[in-house]
Amino acid sequence: MSTVAHPTPPSTARTSFASTGSGLSFTGLLRSESIKLWSLRSTYWTFSLVVVAALGIAVLMSFAMSAGYDPATGAAMGIDTAQMFVIVSTSGLSLGQLIVAVLGVLSISGEYSSGMIKSTFSAVPNRLPALWAKVCVLFGFTFVVGLVSVIGSYLVAIPILGAKDITANLFDVDVILPLLGNVLFLALIAVFAIGIGTIVRSSAGGIATVLGIILLLPTVVGLFSMLVGWVADIVPFMFTVAGSEMITPNTMESWQAFLVVLAWVAVSLGTAALLLKRRDA
């Protein structure tokens, strides 16, 4: 008596994992990267510092703005009430940008220094899905933390500025759009830093490179523009300068500045992806 062997249908789990080239779906990679991110003590410290710095600076800026407010003109230092609330709510993010830049570098360079990157690449041989998952996770959490920071700063400013009858609706277009623009740029800085950290593969080197691009490069280019006239045309295309232009347009439209920022991020991540595939762990 003979038996007929029926072919086993492919596992749905196996087909769903095919996109990452591993035994993990992309959802699983996102969960894994979330666990890795929040297992770092530095994550709690850095995100907490972003919120605390934003709230603390908002309080100081609120008192400064209220002290210079002129009821006759309804403005302080030539700034209307909507702009006042935007400045107060986002001033702390200038420091927050440096903080999340450091976190972005550490989120990948820490795996290289600890050797965990080998386990990551063993689980995800294609490598790139792991990078994209890390980018998505850090972007998402940074955006949420940034949003909490600016809304918290706005709420902190209300009673201080309100004492001088200075008010502005959070959902006013002139208020909410600049706030969201600042939060978006904050998250993009973190993503940009991941790319730099992947390229350099060193915490110290990656942090120095990112902070150099954010802080030093615009200053150096600005100084050269005083000596060579055409260099001034390059200044608006610096990463942080374009980020500011994206929120408060000056020399270019907001959408043009946004494309410049995306170009910086794309170059960072594109180079990181290329090197990730070519280099050994």
Image: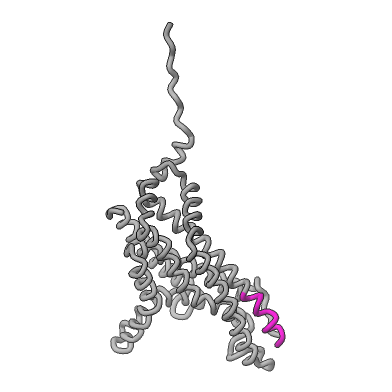
Q: Is residue 245 above or below residue 123?
A: below
In this rendered view, identify the residue nearer to me: 146 or 231: 146
Q: Residue 120 or 182: which is nearer the viewer?
A: 120
User: Residue 266 is drawn in which quadrant?
Assistant: bottom left
Picture coordinates of residue 46 (x, y %)? 50, 69
Q: Residue furthest top?
A: 1
Q: Residue at x 37, y 61 (%)?
A: 269
Q: Is residue 50 left or right of residue 161?
A: left
| 163 magenta-colored | yes
Q: Quadrant of the C terminus?
A: bottom left
Q: Which residues are magenta?
A: 153-164
* Residue at the (59%, 72%) spot, across then down: 150
The relative height of residue 58 versus residue 6 in the rendered view (above or below) is below
Could you tell me which residue is drawn at 38 percent across and 43 percent down? 21
Q: Main secondary structure of the magenta part?
A: helix
Residue 246 percent coordinates (x, y): 48, 73
Residue 205: give x, y in percent of width and height.
33, 69
Does residue 260 sit above or below 107 in this rendering?
A: below
* Quadrant holding the N terminus: top left
Magenta stretch encompasses residue 57: no
Q: How many marks?
A: 0
71 or 196: nearer the viewer: 196
Q: Nearer the viewer, residue 203 or 166?
A: 203
Residue 173, by quadrant, is bottom right
Q: Which residue is at a point 66% across and 93% down the rendered structure image?
A: 70
Q: Residue 214 at x, y = what percent? A: 40, 75
